[in-house]
Image (cartoon, rainbow, N blue to C red):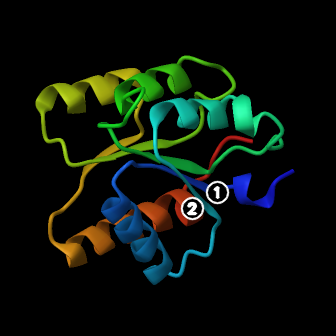
Amino acid sequence: MNEESVADILLVEDSPADVELTVRALKKANLANPILVINDGVAALDYAFRRGEYADRGSSSPKVILLAIKLPKVDGIEVLRRLKSDDATKLIPVVMLTSSREERDVVESYRLGANSYIVKPVDFEKFVEAVEHIGLYWLLLNEPPV
């Protein structure tokens, strides 16, 4: 199994700046969990369902998926829909981490089974704080099903 394809945190984000900020914020919170960054919806689904380049990645699933809405190829709402409609992936916590404050995105995300919806703060310190809370909650406090 490819070591770089093992992840406790799957970050699905196409903005290099947002990826860098999120990863820095997680590290600032002293979360040493492996992070895998995927930049589009098709690759995220391939990872989740062990297809394509991720076909032999092993049987572990991420402890949490941080999912942007605006993604190339397949948007985050459709990725969420597919994840939550499949028995193999529906119990993985999915946190929508997005800049969209649109009510329809919030409602649709929760309707499809998102575990949380967080609007990215524009201010870096607030963003770091939000990501720290995400990491601490989903990786340390949350008790996932076995």
Q: Which residue is mark 2?
A: 139
Q: Position of residue 65 (x, y in %)?
A: 51, 46
Check if mark 1's residue and mark 2's residue have beta carbons within 8 Å: yes
Residue 113, above or below 63? above
Measuring 65% from the left and 37% from the top, which residue is drawn there?
A: 47
Q: Position of residue 133 (x, y in %)?
A: 38, 67
Measuring 22% from the left and 29% from the top, which residue is drawn there?
A: 105
In the image, what residue type sits under mark 2? Leu
Q: Position of residue 144 (x, y in %)?
A: 63, 46
Q: Quadrant of the C terminus?
A: top right
In this view, the residue in front, 55 or 27, is 55
In this view, the residue in front, 80 or 141, is 80
In the image, what residue type sits under mark 1? Asp
Q: Position of residue 114 (x, y in %)?
A: 40, 34
Q: In the figure, residue 110 lies in which quadrant?
A: top left
Q: Is residue 6 visible?
A: no
Side of 48 where 82 appears, left or right: left
Residue, far top: 85
Side of 70 where 85 appears, left or right: right
Question: Circle 1 — which element?
Answer: loop
Residue 19, above or below 46? below
Q: Which residue is mark 1?
A: 8
Side of 59 where 131 appears, left or right: left
For marks 1 and 2, the one nearer the N-term is 1
Figure disc tally = 2
